[in-house]
Image: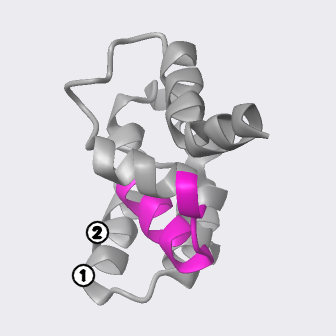
Amino acid sequence: MDVLDDKSRNLPTLLKNEVLSLCPVNIFQKIDNDVLNDILTNGVPSNKIVDILSQSLLRIIPNIILNKREEAVPLLVSAVLLCNDSSMRDKLLQQLFNLKKKPSESERTLILLG
């Protein structure tokens, strides 16, 4: 039983090492290990998922190729609808409206419908 107890105590460390080993870049300097430990031990509450999604979208979308950015529209719209923080919602809406530099009339309509 001692072996099982040792494994269960080390589970967050084992999961963290597994997650970090799958990352293509060295993220030890880029991620707060306390946050990662908390996520791996306690899971992610549903209200935090929206916050994580919103913050990640704002960092990821500017790095997406211009002609593929419209694929992020469903995620942006969902994040806007589910986000409780008004300042984050405004940033997401701004990101939504700035997805395309010169949208055509049909693209404008689709964005506004979203």
Queried whether the magenta region covers residue 46, the answer comes back as: yes
Q: The residue tagged with tag 2: helix, strand or loop?
A: helix
Residue 99 shows in this picture: no
The numbered dot on residue 87 is 1
Q: Which region shows up in magenta?
A: 41-57
Residue 2 appears left or right of 39 = right
Looking at the rendering, in which quadrant would you find the C terminus?
bottom right
Q: Callout 1: few (<14), some (14-19), or many (20+) C-alpha neighbours within 10 Å? A: few
Q: Residue at x 49, y 71 (%)?
A: 48
Looking at the rendering, in which quadrant would you find the N terminus?
top right
Q: Residue at x 35, y 53 (%)?
A: 35
Q: The residue tagged with tag 1: helix, strand or loop?
A: helix
Q: As shown in the figure, which amino acid type bears the numbered disc 2? A: Lys
Q: Residue at x 56, y 63 (%)?
A: 42
User: Does 29 sit above or below residue 46?
Assistant: above
Q: As shown in the figure, which amino acid type bears the numbered disc 1? A: Ser
Pointer 2: what residue? 91
The answer for how far apart the CA atoms under marks 1 and 2 are is 6 Å
Q: Nearer the viewer, residue 24 or 60?
A: 24
Q: Nearer the viewer, residue 20 or 25?
A: 20
In x, y percent, where is residue 99? Answer: 41, 49
Residue found at the very far left of the displayed protein: 29
Q: Residue at x 20, y 25 (%)?
A: 29
The numbered dot on residue 74 is none
